[in-house]
Image (cartoon, rainbow, N blue to C red):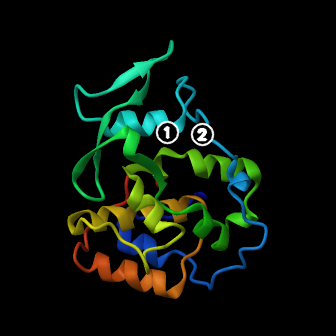
Amino acid sequence: MTAGSAPLSTQAVVALGGLAVKGRAPRTGYSRNQFGGGWRDPDGNGCNARQDTLARQAVAGTQRSSGTHRCVTSAAILDPYTGAQVPSTGADIDHVVAEGDAWQTGAQQLTRTQRTAFANDPLGLIATAAHLNRGKGDSNAASWLPPLKTYRCAYVARQIAIKRKYRLWVTAPERDAMNRVLTTCPHQTLPAGGH
């Protein structure tokens, strides 16, 4: 933020209005290796981003840890996409803004370091049932939303926060789908960490 500029709104609908709207860029050159090729330890606590995500969503009393840093390796997690408990052995870590979607909406212009930060940013990671994550694939809000309707506002707000943080754009159908969700929760705010 520059001197004299207004602070960025934390209201999701306002933040969505501030995102650029463009078509998808070509998928040329995309691979998961463009995003660092594996889990990192972004906060320096000795545990990788997957372990930290499991720890954040672990149901009390179910987690098992290992290593000197007591990183969570096994737990029952609360899946916000369904509201159900899922064993970590049946969970994937979902990139709320899929890496493939990010690549086609501006991430190809980021540095490899920025893309690795994106891939390991707690703001953009949610543990969910593996079949949901794999069914979502590289979809954006225009073609995939969580089955639990009461979580859709928070999900869309998280996508907006990530796209704003990493200067990614939205497609017109994606923006329209996000707006439709946000009409049901006009005062939805962005999650912490979304700048």
Q: Callout 1 environment at 10 Å: few (<14), some (14 to 19), or many (20+)?
A: many
Residue at left offset 48%, top offset 73%: 140
| Name of the residue lying farthest toward the right | 29
Whole-percent x, y for residue 10 in the image: 38, 61
Residue under label 1, please give it. Answer: 50
Give how far across and how far down residue 129 sits, in percent: 36, 53
- Relative side of 104 to 63, left or right: right
Q: Are marks 2 and 1 in contact (CB under 8 Å)?
A: yes
User: Residue drawn at (65%, 73%), measured in percent from left and top?
Assistant: 104
Q: Which residue is mark 2?
A: 39
Looking at the picture, does residue 47 appear above or below residue 146?
above
In the current view of this chain or complex, which residue is farthest to the top?
68
Q: CA distance from mark 2 to mark 1?
A: 7 Å
Up/down of 10 relative to 193, above or below: below
- Left or right, 164 with respect to 88, comes to right
Q: Earlier in the sequence, mark 2 or mark 1?
A: 2
Q: Is disc 2 placed on a helix, strand or loop?
A: loop
Where does the image place residue 114, in percent across and percent down from the top left? Answer: 69, 51
Residue name at image x 72 percent, y 79 percent: 26
Which residue is located at x 43 percent, y 80 percent?
142
Pick the residue in front: 177 or 34. 34
When the figure is inspected, residue 23 is found, relative to residue 41, above or below; the finding is: below
Q: Amino acid at mark 1?
A: Arg
What amino acid type is highlighted by mark number 2?
A: Trp
The percent position of residue 150, horizontal first and vertical second, equals: 21, 65
Quadrant position of residue 17: bottom left
Q: Is residue 8 visible?
A: no
Q: Name the element at disc 1.
A: helix
Mark linked to residue 106: none
Q: Is residue 109 visible?
A: yes
Quadrant (top left, top right, bottom left, bottom right) of the N terminus: bottom right
